[in-house]
Amino acid sequence: MSPDTFGPADPGFETRVRDSFARQQVMRTLGVAMAALTPGRCELQMPFAPAFTQQHGFLHAGIVTTVADSAAGYAAYSLMPEDSSVLTVEFKQNLLAPAAGRLLIARAAVVRPGRQLSVVQSEAFVADAAGTEKAIALMQATMICLPGRPDRAA
């Protein structure tokens, strides 16, 4: 991940981002929690659940991608103005290993923030019962800032 740190455009970013995350039904359905949030960085965690596995018993690649994408979006959103919202423009996900473990962890960091587009890297890991982590996926994503369109419930 990029060692760069960026300042948020909104001093109240943490409440705004966490409130937005709480409205994501898909994250609630998957049991995902926001474990850490700082300007330009976000960590999401999801306990392993058999309901979200594929035929070999690994977490489905679509689930891993969904969590990594949300972590990237919220890392970018943490740097955006108060009256804005965020959407994914594109991403590339490399799957490095099967997602077999007790906990899925997605850590995202903004590589380059922009007024309109931000580039974010999101890494996914699985942790076993002892807490040992193994890298399973690497994502590079582009997020768009939608100014004047506050993120709120419809």
Image (cartoon, rainbow, N blue to C red):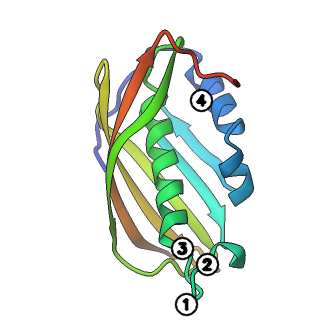
What residue does disc 2 label?
A: 53
Q: Are marks 4 and 3 in contact (CB under 8 Å)?
A: no
Residue at 42% in and 47% down: 108
What residue does disc 1 label?
A: 56
Q: What's the CA distance linking mark 1 and mark 4?
A: 35 Å
Q: Are marks 1 and 2 in contact (CB under 8 Å)?
A: yes
Rendered image: mark on residue 37: none
Looking at the picture, which amino acid does disc 1 mark?
A: His
Q: Earlier in the sequence, mark 4 or mark 3?
A: 4
Rendered image: mark on residue 17: 4
From this view, report whether residue 130 is shown above or below residue 86. Answer: below
* Residue 149 pos. (x, y %): 52, 14
Q: Outermost residue, bottom direction?
A: 56
Q: What's the CA distance linking mark 2 and mark 4?
A: 28 Å
Q: What's the CA distance linking mark 4 and mark 3?
A: 26 Å
Looking at the picture, which amino acid does disc 4 mark?
A: Val
